[in-house]
Amino acid sequence: MIRKYVYGKPFETEAVVQKIEACEGTMPYFDAYKETDLAGGSAEMEQSVLVNMTEAQLTEMNVKSMKSGFRYVMDKTDVVYGLGENIRGINKRGWHYTSYADDNPHHHEDVQRLYGAHNFFIVDGKKRFGIFLDYPGEITFDVGYTHKDEFRIFLKDMNFVAYVIEGSSLKDIVKQFRQMIGRSYIAPRWALGYCQSRWGYENAEDVRYVVKQYRDNHVPLDMICVDIDYMDGYRNFTIDEKAYPAFEELVQEMRQQKVHLVPIIDAGVKADPDYYVDVEGLEKGYFCKKEDGTEFVGTVWPGECHFPDFLNPEARKWFGHHYSFLLNKGIDGFWNDMNEPAIFYSKRQMSEMKEKIKIMFEDSLPTDQEIDSLAWKLQDLKNSRKDYQSFYHEVNGEQVCHDKVHNLYGYNMTRAAGEAFEELMPDKRILMYSRSSYTGMHRYGGIWYGDNYSWWSHLKMNLSMLPAMSMQGFLYSGADLGGFGSDVTEDLLLRWLELGIFTPLMRNHSAKGTREQEVYQFTDIDAFGRIIGLRYALLPYIYSEYMKACLRDEMLFRPLAFDYEEDTFASQVEDQLMLGDSIMIAPVLQQNATGRYVYLPEEMKLVRFRSSTDYEEEILQAGHHYVTAALDEVVIFIRPDKLLVLSNGGESVEDVDFDNVKTIAFVKKEAVYEYYQDDGNSRYYDKEEHFRKIVEK
Ligand code: GLC
């Protein structure tokens, strides 16, 4: 059951597609809560008085700062799931998270926000309920950070919609939420192939070289991403003719090798009187404007940029149709970047900063502390709140300050593309994944989890994020395998790929200046080939489960507790996941480990793969086990009376035979599997003939 509560005058985010009548009163479970700098009085006294006080009364009492929100007192055993793309574990308890999309390449353990804003969570314990706060501005979720047993939520203002969801199980709560927000974006099947990417393929020859290495070494490959270097001066919808001459031919040449070229598109449009997109945008008035009616200018990769007003449907349509520049060249996949939007700095902020620095250095030499504080201040120029507060969107003829709707920017950039694809290519699926997102964007594209590091802790974080992303409906998603920033090691890349073979988006991406991390750069190319080859063998299962999760509004990756609700230990397990209907995965996440401890909530069949044809099976009883998994081995666990479907693999998705599959089953009585297959490319997903039953006795 879903109950809807409307507070104040919410902004229409279009995150929710189901029509739900609003209830009277205030949302259950959470009490109204105010936090001030007022001292004295017991917390209870303070709250009962505070929540009823007016702004004027509080000012009179000399209250310096005040936050309004809600509070839920958690039971010791309560577990909190959700909040999408965020740091820390599967259980979100014990930290505070902020929904305010951020271009933050440092995913340290103490950051509060990343690129997306996903305001859906479930509290599971004495009471069990899910809540989605539909609010496009900043929210803080303090999940036992300030007070370890209190879950406090603060919103910038009290204009929002709360959806409270109760259900018969954790899965049921998620399913209701997902039905409410609409079907997830469905990627073409080829986009579940392996993708090689790097910010640093500077020209067509670099691209050809990478693809040749993969093909020569017989390591499967379906995609290669081109980063900002393919554009002319980082201008969207242009090609650098020197570095990438005859682009169309390159696209065709890649297609002949069964590889898709996937270009990046950035949110900012270079401010340049000689650039057709900028000229058009200015003429039509489609860029975000300042209070004085002139266009806001911020600096990103191309230098000074204008920012399309994606909240304006006409501007959205205009920008979306520009993708045809590349579609017409044979491109069928894109990634949308820098769409929080990332702003390195604005002229105004930079002038103020220069002034501050001048003053600092004027009379005396700065102290060590002053130098440190200067470094911080310079960082503050990036993605500055003041900039976000200084420009506006036009929504139904009204000017809306960007800061209030910040989280909708990346969503609507990707929606611009998604809506255009539906119009321009109605019969074909186009690959799209974005960096920034909000609930609702999951209908138009997938996401990648941004600029992580080549750290073992980030491999673990990748695993923790997967079920949270599944809850939010971002089923086509994945992290930069091997890590984006810093230098990867061979073992980390191999272990990371051993998780990556299960994620729909399987992309190895890294930053300029870091160690090159294409798999052929390392010693044991054979091991990489076998592991990536295993992905292709597992594709019938992964694609089938991915599609069923999309079509039925279900989770692809689940924490163990979602399948074993009665098992009191299951909610403690932070490093294993249920994947689809049949299996549990437990990747090795630690350097130099030759195995790991695994918890089995029930008897399962372990399959230890060295490749798709070289594997061994063993039945393990429920309980705790130490399971060996050498550097080039992947262990998976099949549940009782469930089975895995496998193909003979291939070097590209096109080569995979999805019709003639073999099975590995754990038969107790009878293993049954519902196998989904379609052409992988058209948009007719729901046909009955796509489903078939496979039975093993
Ligand atoms: C951002 C993206 C990264 C990309 C880089 C250059 O940092 O997150 O993936 O490689 O920009 O375009």
Image (cartoon, helix red, strand yellow):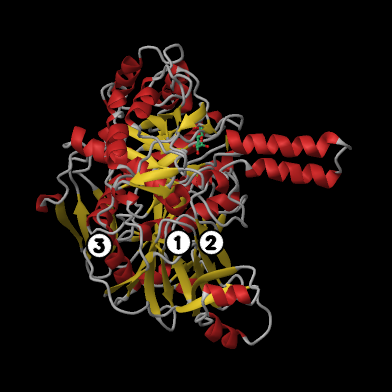
- Residue under label 1, please give it: 83
Give the image location of residue 167, x and y in percent.
30, 76
Q: Are marks 1 and 2 in contact (CB under 8 Å)?
A: yes
Q: Which mark, residue 179?
A: 3
| Residue farthest toward the right in the current orientation of the protein | 364
Amino acid carrying label 1: it is Leu
Q: Which mark, residue 434?
A: none
Q: Nearer the viewer, residue 241 or 172?
A: 241
Please determine whether, in this image, residue 142 is positioned above or below residue 653: below
- Residue under label 2, please give it: 97
Pointer 2 residue Cβ closer than 8 Å to ligand 1: no
> Quick check: 105 left or right of 691?
right
Please determine whether, in this image, residue 306 is positioned above or below residue 52: above
Amino acid carrying label 2: it is Tyr
Specify few, some or many for label 3: CA neighbours under 10 Å numbering under 14, 14-19, or 20 or more.
some
Q: Give the Cα distance between marks 3 and 1.
A: 18 Å
Give the image location of residue 68, x and y in percent.
51, 71
Specify few, some or many for label 1: CA neighbours under 10 Å numbering under 14, 14-19, or 20 or more.
many
Is residue 588 visible to the viewer in this orientation of the structure? no
Badge 2 or badge 3: first in the primary sequence: 2
Q: Give the Cα distance between marks 2 and 3.
A: 25 Å
Q: Which of 476 and 37 is in front in this view?
A: 37
Badge 1 or badge 2: first in the primary sequence: 1
Residue visible at 74% across and 39% down in the picture: 356
> Quick check: 366 left or right of 112?
right
Is residue 342 visible to the viewer in this orientation of the structure? yes
- The local secondary structure at tag 3 comes to helix
Q: Give the Cα distance between marks 1 and 2.
A: 8 Å
Amino acid carrying label 3: it is Gln
Please determine whether, in this image, residue 525 is positioned above or below residue 130: above
